[in-house]
Image (spheres, rainbow, N blue to C red):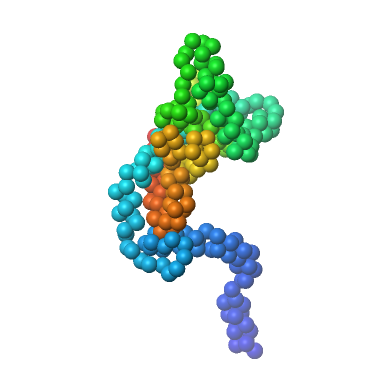
Amino acid sequence: MATTRRSAQRVRRRRVPVAPYLFVAPFVLVFAGFSAYPIFFALQLSFTNWHGAGALEIIGFANYRYLLTSPDFWQSMATSGVLWLLVVPAQVLVALTIAVALRKAKFRGVFSAALIAPFVTPLVAMAQVWIILFDKDFGAVNQGLSSIGLPAIGWLTTSAGAKVTVALLVLWRTTGYAVILLMAGLSTIPSDVYEAATIDGAGAWHQFWSITVPLVTRTLSFVVVIGTLTVFQLFAEPYVVTGGGPFNATRTAGLYLYKHITNSDLGLGAANSMLLVVMVLALSLASIRLLRSREDS
């Protein structure tokens, strides 16, 4: 009897609970079907010259060699890099300033709704508004410049102007979302930290630089990563506003990748996407490391 009881206890100890696995199974299945499998399939495609039909023909690293020696590929990466410099630092600075200003403001819910509105506005509609605003001859922006004696700028007809126009549209759409994230990060800072700093005689700037920035560094890192992903995936904004022009000045990495898809060069497109993932990952890690060094110091 005692032996039977001990055997039953050992069986109960060995019994593996099934319920947790059943609860997480839907997520695992969806992730495997819609994320993991496409990634591995794209990696496999990057070593082929597949055009959408027929058997996969392995061609080794030919796609990668072609892209890494292609001026068009590096031009698209350089364009995305310039847009990153125009968008991400400005987005972090503006978003942090607005978030700090709204930290103690009343009706924060109303402000939050107003800030998120550009993010949910249909992009194509806003792109058309942008085209009208930045028209060289009839746009409101150049009309404003001429009213104060400044010359008209070819926002959509020059390389520099087109990049700035696209960057401003991206900033307008995404900064509000960054503000919401930073407001959430600021809300986790205890108020007694600021009260202690005030008693010690610290001014507003010293409190901002020595308390606020270090304590929201992790949120800033997340904002930078999201901004980096947004810029290097840019497609709709330059496609609608400038069509990638003038003279391919706004042909981003996303637009160049789209060119491979429309030409049915799916193997080349897959290799392009893999290189893009590696570069975005490296840039994101470098940004996080830079911000973490500030947090540690």
Q: Judge whether 177 appears above or below 97 on screen.
A: below
Rendered residue at 34%/56% (across/down): 63
Instruction: List x then y, in percent, for residue 70.
Output: 32, 47
Mark count: 0
Rendered residue at 66%/31% (across/down): 114
Locate residue 154 relative to residue 188 in the image: left or right.
left
Q: Judge whether 29 appears above or below 102 on screen.
A: below
Q: Is residue 182 visible?
A: no
**Image quarter in which the N terminus is found:** bottom right
Instruction: List x then y, in percent, for residue 281.
Output: 41, 48
Instruction: List x then y, in percent, for residue 256.
Output: 43, 46
Camera-nearest residue between 220 and 13: 220
**Image quarter in which the C terminus is found:** top left
Instruction: List x then y, in percent, for residue 131.
Output: 55, 30
Picture quadrant of residue 103: top right
Q: Judge whether 232 appears above or below 82 on screen.
A: below
Rendered residue at 49%/42% (across/down): 234
Q: Is residue 234 visible?
A: yes
Q: Judge whether 152 appears above or below 256 on screen.
A: above
Locate residue 286 relative to residue 240 in the image: left or right.
left
Camera-nearest residue between 136 and 71: 136
Camera-nearest residue between 221 and 118: 118
Rendered residue at 49%/33% (across/down): 166
